[in-house]
Each structure stands twice: as structure tokens, then as C-alpha cells.
């Protein structure tokens, strides 16, 4: 099986063999993922222009309806995700529930938040502030959607929750999502996005998915784009110092996790501690 990327309104497979996704328990190869040959620049522009325009035209309540549609779609397909999580991440059902239900629950929460914001399309931040003695000279801050994409580079250990928590707030803000899951555990992210796309709950360009290397992503960002990264401090440093990220003053939010490992040795047998 080869995981395709969903870009520019279509599923596109990479042109080479790509990277293998492995069952961490059995060592069996489950699928391959590649972005070679995928036109990243065009995909980002499509998301900005097509998806961004559609989302900005909607109110918060309407965007909340889209998020609820995602949550409802994932809930309807929930049982199938546990098998995928076991195969690709080695998760027990309880572990998988934290990731899968965490993603669905976060979507539902922000759908509720969006409904409470009603028909507004922008947010007034605070009250009028006087800028001079003359009372006629006053101003306030108005929060509006950026006209780029939300590029989400996610960690391997939460292929559901990590993806959907970022997507929920980005869609609610009126910004298209461009998700790049960790390749090693991308199978669950791929399956979920495929279900959402097949359900037709989002306007074209509102959600894109790249399965495989992050090749060329940072090269094609603009000052209107924003990056949310979860992963290692080393990779975060590379992204922060990328010449285009620095030169274009790309917004970047980093969660650089440190993880503890539990390693099962080859001498372990059934019933052993």
C-alpha cells in the first residue's frame, strides 16, 4: 500500500518507493509514503487561495459546523481506527483511545466554542483605547484570519490528537490546514483524513495532507503562513533557522517534547515481568 498525499483537491502518490511504515511489534511492512514528485508550491497556493477564501467567507458558527462535521465523521468510523493504531503504533486499545478520542473530543470542544461566537467573522480584541487627549482619536485591535495556511508538522506519538487539535483552532480561525504527520505513524492520520475527505464535509482546499518527507515545505512558505511544530528540539532548530522562515518572518509555534522510552528486550517472553 502507498499512502497518497491529498493536495490541490486530489490524492497524489509519490513517484518513488518512499519510506516504509513498520508494525513496531511484528516488524512487518504496512505501507510506504513518499512526497517525491508532489507539487508542494502549487498545493500551498491552492490551499491559500481556494480553501482560505472559502473559510474567510464563513462566520465562526459556520466554521464550527465544519469542525463538528469532522468530529461526526471520525466518530462514525471510530472503531476502525483502533486496528490501525495497533498495527502502526503498537498501541493497546486504552492507549489508542487517548489519541483517537482526544482528537475527536478536541474537535467537539472547539465546535462548541465556535457556535458561541455566532455570526461574526472577526474578533474585536478589547475595548477602544484613547491614543491622545482628543477623544476622537481612539483605536482598537481587530483579529482577522491570516491569508496563508496553517502548516502543521506533527509528532509520531499522537497521529490523531496532535493533528486534530491543531486543525480545530486553525479552521475556526478561518485558515486552511496543511497537515504533515510523522511518516513513521502516518497511517492513522491518512485514514482519518481520507474519511473526512470522502464525507465531503469541508470546502475544497480547507484540508490538505502530506504523507512522507517535508521536502520543500519550508522553502515555499510566506509571511502570511503560520507553522505549528511538535517534535524534537533539533528539528525545531532547523525549521526556525531555515533561510525562508527567517527571511519571510514566518510565524512559528514549537512544542519540543522530550520522551521517555520503554524498551522490550528480545529475551522477554509471555508472562515475564
Image (spheres, rainbow, N blue to C red):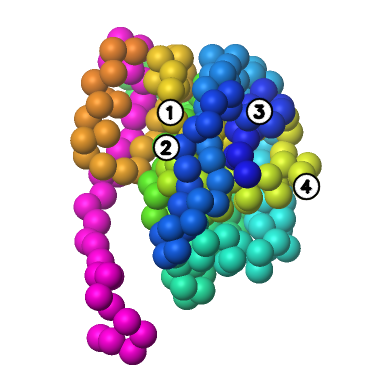
Mark 2 and mark 1 in contact (Cβ < 8 Å)? yes
Q: Secondary structure beneath disc 1?
A: loop
For disc 3, the marked residue is 12
Q: Which residue is pictured at 39% across the width and 55% down the height?
A: 157
Residue 91 position within the rendered picture, expressed as x and y whole percent measured from the top left:
45, 67
Check disc 2 and report its element: helix, strand or loop.
strand
- Of badges 3 and 4, nearer the viewer stands 3
With respect to residue 126, does 102 lie above or below? below
Of label 3 and label 4, which has the lower sequence position?
3
Disc 4 target residue: 199
User: What is the number of the mark on residue 214?
Assistant: 1
Q: On the image, which quarter does residue 129 sit in?
A: top left
Front-most of residues 112 and 21: 21
Q: CA distance from mark 1 to mark 2?
A: 8 Å
| Residue for badge 2 | 153
Q: Position of residue 257 (x, y in %)?
A: 26, 49
Q: Earlier in the sequence, mark 2 or mark 4?
A: 2
Residue 66 visible somewhere in the drawing: no
Magenta-drawn segment: 245-273
Q: CA distance from mark 2 to mark 4?
A: 24 Å
Please identify the dominant SS of the magenta region. loop
Vertical comparison of 56 with 222: above or below: below
**Extreme front residue here?**
267
Residue 247 placed where, x, y %? 30, 10
Distance CA(mark 3)–CA(mark 1): 15 Å
Looking at the image, tell me whether mark 3 or mark 1 is earlier in sequence order.
3
Front label number (3 vs 2) = 3
Q: CA distance from mark 4 to mark 1?
A: 27 Å
Contact? badges 4 and 1 (CB < 8 Å): no
Amino acid at each position: 500500500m502507498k499512502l497518497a498525499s491529498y493536495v490541490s483537491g486530489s490524492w497524489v502518490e509519490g513517484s518513488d518507493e518512499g519510506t516504509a511504515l513498520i508494525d513496531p511489534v511484528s516488524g512487518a511492512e504496512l505501507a510506504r509514503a513518499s512526497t517525491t514528485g508532489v507539487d508542494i508550491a502549487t498545493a500551498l497556493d491552492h490551499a491559500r487561495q481556494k480553501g482560505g477564501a472559502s473559510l474567510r467567507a464563513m462566520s465562526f458558527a459556520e466554521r464550527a459546523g465544519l469542525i463538528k462535521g469532522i468530529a461526526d465523521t471520525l466518530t462514525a468510523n471510530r472503531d476502525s481506527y483502533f486496528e490501525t493504531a495497533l498495527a502502526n503504533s503498537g498501541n493497546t486499545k486504552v492507549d489508542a483511545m487517548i489519541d483517537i478520542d482526544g482528537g475527536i473530543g478536541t474537535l467537539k470542544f472547539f465546535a462548541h466554542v465556535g457556535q458561541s461566537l455566532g455570526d461574526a467573522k472577526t474578533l474585536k480584541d478589547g475595548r477602544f483605547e484613547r491614543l491622545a487627549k482628543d477623544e476622537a482619536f481612539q483605536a482598537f485591535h481587530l483579529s482577522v484570519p491570516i491569508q496563508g495556511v496553517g502548516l502543521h508538522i506533527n509528532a509520531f506519538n499522537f497521529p490523531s490528537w496532535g493533528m486534530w487539535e491543531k486543525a480545530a483552532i486553525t479552521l475556526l480561525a478561518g485558515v486552511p490546514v496543511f497537515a504533515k504527520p510523522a511518516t513513521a505513524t502516518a497511517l492513522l492520520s491518512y485514514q482519518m483524513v481520507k474519511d473526512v475527505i470522502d464525507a465531503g464535509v469541508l470546502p475544497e482546499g480547507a484540508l490538505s495532507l502530506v504523507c512522507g518527507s517535508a521536502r520543500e515545505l519550508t522553502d515555499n512558505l510566506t509571511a502570511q503562513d503560520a507553522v505549528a511544530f511538535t517534535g524534537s528540539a533539533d528539528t525545531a532548530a532547523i525549521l526556525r533557522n531555515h533561510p525562508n522562515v527567517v527571511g519571510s518572518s514566518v510565524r512559528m509555534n514549537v512544542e519540543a517534547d522530550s520522551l521517555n522510552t520503554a524498551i522490550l528486550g528480545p529475551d522477554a517472553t509471555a508472562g515475564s515481568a
